[in-house]
Image (cartoon, grey):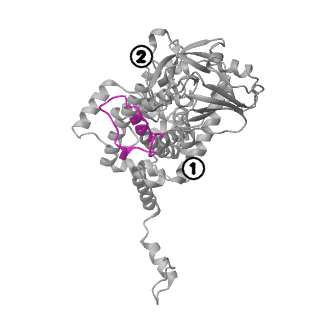
Amino acid sequence: MSRPRQPAKGVDPNLLIKDAAKLLPAPSRRLFLRGATSLGALAMLTGCDIIDGPTSENALRVISNFNDWVQARLFSETTLAPTFPESAVTRPFPFNAYYAEDEAPDINGDNYKLEIGGLVDNKTPWTLAELNRLPEVSQITRLVCVEGWSAIGSWQGVRLSDFLKLIGADTKARYVWFQCAEGYSNTIDMPSALHPQTQLTLKFDHKTLPQAYGFPIRIRIPTKLGFKNPKYVTAMWVQNNDAGGYWENQGYNWFSGL
Amino acid sequence: MRRHFAKNLPMTAEFAGNSAALPDTATGSLIHPRWVRVTHWINALAVLLMIGSGWQIYDASPLFNFIYFPRHFALGEWLAGALLWHFAAMWLLVVNGIVYVTLGIATGRFRRKLLPIRLHEVMRDLGAALRGRLAHDDLAVYNAVQRLLYLGVILAGIVIVLSGLSIWKPVQFKYLTAFFGGYDTARYVHFFAMASIVGFLTIHVVLALIVPKSLRAMIFGR
């Protein structure tokens, strides 16, 4: 296909170069052209393959990992998400998922059990009745979606840090991984799991969590974007390896802190 | 220009670094020192990346049902890609912006070039501009409309970065978010700051093309 370029017979390559050099514009002129070319290239940038291709995507993921590190440092276990009065609750609170509302998992609460695994002392699964007997905390906070919209909701449940202590979780472990009924999953960092507002949510608006909002369990983390608040949770593992997550694996930022 | 050199010492100092590489010739003296040109073009790249990816992010949850940015102008294939671009280019924009604003203040360039802005001069120069009678013999001196627009776009840049931070971190930077009227309002502030920067860019690019020597000055410095 590609063969080396040969100058025409009888032409001295060195002379050819000298002649060509004369045709080049003055240094300043050349610079201007280069500037103009890059301007043109800039105008073409949006929607072009070079910057939307796999190479740039890898570079962007490296920066995204750096942003995870920055966000972990910005995060403070004592900085609380703003809370709101009852009157500020968004009604109706929106349903949002990668599937339609009528395709949301329909879980039978009677035989449901929350599986526990990984670096915990007591791995006994929990029924909903047992979870509902634990001390209840309540919060009215803003859920911020990665798409940009936000909605204020009223959530009740068990403080996740209390629950982790109760089951004898190794809170020195790096991650908590959540598995959901429809195949969704999330890994969150331990500091966010131990944040005082992070909640194993069983109720919305003081009533049993509706199917649309994640029955039987949603992990409500007001310091993270909505997609880091898994619904229809069936299992929780405490571990030191990052098991990724549904959206994170597709390129969304891993930490996604607020 | 000459009289400025004579009576304005900081300007001489500002030029000192470049005067060796680019000797002052009969063709004219340096209009834009190298740091202005370098930060200008890095900023141009960062702003294009931020706007392209920002439009795609906007489309995921539009603020106005009559404003939607065509996919062709958006950057990043889909929301995840656009967010990766936005939160990568933000470093370029912010670091470069900090260098630019710091040097602009420290060298006295902002004070010298952009101030003072007097209303009657703005009205006078705006009138002259609209009648096509604005002089461009000395590119080193900005007219009142230029001063207003350049200072305005620097302020818009500061607003867009701060409102962006308040959208990105409404918990960790909750007081900043509250300053912008809360999360939802901060999104509108961010949008209108973008709109004003796009408006500035339109005028800026059109005028640079009408007066090509100004484009040349931003590349070579003179």
Q: Where is residue B54 in the image (x, y as percent from the top left)?
A: 43, 37
Residue B63 magenta-highlighted = yes
Q: What residue type is labelled 2?
A: Arg
Q: Mark 1 lies on which chain?
A: A
> Which image quadrant is residue A157 in?
top right
Residue under circle 2? A91
Q: Is residue A68 left or right of residue B180?
A: right
The residue closer to the viewer here, A72 or B204, is A72
Of badges 2 and 1, the one in the foreground is: 2
Residue A50 circle label: none
Q: How far apart are marks 2 and 1 (CA)?
A: 41 Å
Q: What residue span does the magenta drawing correspond to?
A: B53-79
Same subunit, labels 2 and 1: the answer reads yes
Q: Compared to A255, does A1 lie above or below?
A: below
Q: Position of residue B31 (x, y in %)?
A: 44, 45
Q: What residue type is labelled 1?
A: Asn
Q: How crowded is mark 2: few (under 14 residues within 10 Å), some or many (20 or more)?
A: few
Q: How crowded is mark 1: few (under 14 residues within 10 Å), some or many (20 or more)?
A: few
Residue A58 circle label: 1
Residue in the image at 42% along x and 54% along y: A41
Q: Compared to B115, does B17 lie above or below?
A: below
Residue in the image at 45% along x and 52% along y: B220
Q: Count every numbered label the image shows and give the total.
A: 2
Q: Position of residue B43 (x, y in %)?
A: 48, 42
Residue in the image at 41% along x and 35% along y: B60
Q: Which chain carries label 2?
A: A
